[in-house]
Image (tube, rainbow, N blue to C red):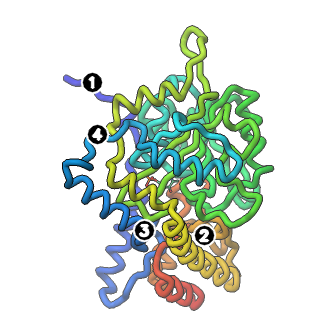
């Protein structure tokens, strides 16, 4: 019989959202008259910018005309989008990226999950704790995480981020080959400044390690000394791969477009200690397993960088950040200890009286009919924390806060 990928079968189920749904359904069944407000959603809610819709509509028309029809897109993206990405997201910030270092894709989730295919199965991986689960699970599926027990993988190096270290991870206390960093952070909503990120770049250069930098929330950054790209840190182009997405920047969660930067200076070694370019390896991987992003979607993504597109997307981001500010400030007023929500659409709060995130979940559900996400769902160091998101409407967010404050 077929022998399966055993590490994949040993993965614990994703109980988090199933468990949340179960508790919510039980509550709703008992209290059919009570309306729930969801501040647990990690998905955008506001519509696409008109500039994006116009560009995509025009592209659809082109696809329906013999003279302007497009078949398979170039495997790594159309030049018009790659050039717009470089000009707007990198050149404007003093970062020099060349077109063959940009890989347009269908998502930062797939890229950050697939990138580990480039690493040997022996490589040692570090992740922050709490963490976006994709980095952990994709490595666990490849047999790189060891054995799972008591909520932790034996071979992963966990870098706790809690109130105790002000959400600034310590450098790994041992040699690791890959470090996954996501800033602005999901779930904590916190950021690293240039000075706080620099030691990770220095560590990676010293240890010959690779940093996978997930910058999916970079458009939410307001604070001046917080980098939008890891390449703003000196030396990062020799040790970091950066994943970006139009999902949160421009409401593309249902459209699907992202890009990953793999600089030509990033190398690994093969079994014979011969240097191999990770850019070339990723190009090989993508051209084999991926057939590109549709012309229509890439025209929509290009329009995000048009003058109107920029203005319209910023308006939507400001809308979400107004929600984040409301959540943060109202909770503070009520005596909660809160983090994040300044440069990210997430607020991370310490549960009152050190109750568990799950107990706080039940409390909010019963007393305020507000649904959030318990910190335990993102890793052991998430215990005793709780995530609220800024993606609902302003009115619903206001109502939720009023109810939380009345508990
Ligand atoms: C939402 C999100 C992404 C974006 O993923 P897409 O596949 O591009 O939609 C990436 N990383 C993190 C941490 C996220 O929360």
SS type, badge 2: strand
Residue 402 rendering spot, x and y as whole percentages: 55, 90
Q: Which residue is mark 2?
A: 347
Q: Which residue is mark 4?
A: 72
First-in-chain label (4 vs 1): 1
First-in-chain label (2 vs 1): 1
First-in-chain label (4 vs 3): 3
**Disc 2 within 8 angstroms of ligand 1 (CB):** no
Point 69% across, 80% down: residue: 332
In the image, which is nearer the foreground, mark 2 or mark 3?
3
* Residue 339, image quadrant: bottom right
Residue 94 rendering spot, x and y as whole percentages: 71, 48
In the image, which is nearer the foreground, mark 1 or mark 3?
3
* Residue 236, image quadrant: top right
The relative height of residue 311 versus residue 184 in the rendered view (above or below) is below
Query: What's the distance in space between the residues labelled 4 and 1, CA to CA?
Result: 35 Å
Query: What's the distance in space between the residues labelled 4 and 3, CA to CA?
Result: 24 Å
Q: Is residue 54 left or right of residue 194?
A: left
């Amino acid at each position: 019989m077929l022998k399966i990928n055993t590490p994949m079968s040993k993965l614990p189920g994703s109980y988090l959202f199933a468990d949340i749904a179960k508790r919510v359904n039980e509550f709703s069944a008992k209290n059919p008259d009570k309306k729930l407000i969801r501040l647990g959603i990690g998905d955008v809610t506001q519509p696409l910018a008109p500039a994006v819709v116009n560009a995509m509509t025009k592209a659809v028309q082109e696809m329906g005309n013999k003279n302007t029809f497009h078949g398979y897109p170039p495997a790594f993206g159309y030049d018009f989008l790659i050039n717009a990405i470089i000009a707007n997201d990198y050149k404007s910030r003093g970062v020099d990226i060349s077109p063959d270092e940009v890989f347009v894709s269908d998502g930062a989730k797939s890229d950050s999950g697939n990138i580990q295919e480039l690493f040997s199965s022996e490589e040692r991986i570090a992740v922050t704790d709490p963490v976006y689960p994709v980095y952990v699970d994709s490595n666990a599926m490849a047999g790189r995480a060891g054995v799972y027990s008591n909520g932790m993988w034996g071979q992963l190096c966990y870098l706790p981020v809690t109130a105790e270290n002000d959400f600034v991870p310590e450098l790994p206390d041992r040699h690791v080959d890959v470090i996954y960093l996501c800033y602005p952070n999901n779930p904590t909503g916190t950021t690293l400044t240039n000075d706080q990120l620099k030691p990770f770049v220095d560590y990676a250069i010293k240890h010959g390690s690779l940093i996978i930098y997930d910058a999916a929330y970079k458009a939410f950054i307001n604070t001046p000394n917080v980098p939008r790209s890891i390449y703003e840190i000196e030396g990062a182009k020799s040790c970091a791969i950066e994943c970006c997405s139009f999902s949160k920047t421009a409401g593309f969660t249902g459209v699907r477009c992202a890009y990953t930067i793999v600089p030509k200076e990033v190398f690994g070694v093969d079994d014979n200690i011969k240097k191999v370019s990770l850019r070339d390896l990723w190009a090989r991987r993508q051209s084999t397993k991926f057939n590109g992003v549709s012309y229509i979607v890439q025209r929509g993504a290009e329009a995000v960088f048009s003058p109107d597109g920029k203005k319209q997307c910023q308006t939507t981001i400001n809308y979400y950040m107004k929600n984040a500010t409301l959540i943060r400030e109202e909770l503070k007023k009520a005596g909660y200890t809160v983090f994040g929500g300044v440069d990210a659409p997430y607020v991370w709060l310490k549960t009152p009286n050190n109750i568990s995130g799950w107990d706080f979940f039940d409390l909010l559900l019963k007393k305020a009919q507000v649904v959030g996400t318990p910190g335990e769902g993102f890793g052991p160091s998430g215990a005793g924390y709780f995530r609220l998101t800024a993606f609902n409407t302003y009115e619903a967010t206001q109502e939720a806060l009023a109810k939380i404050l009345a508990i």
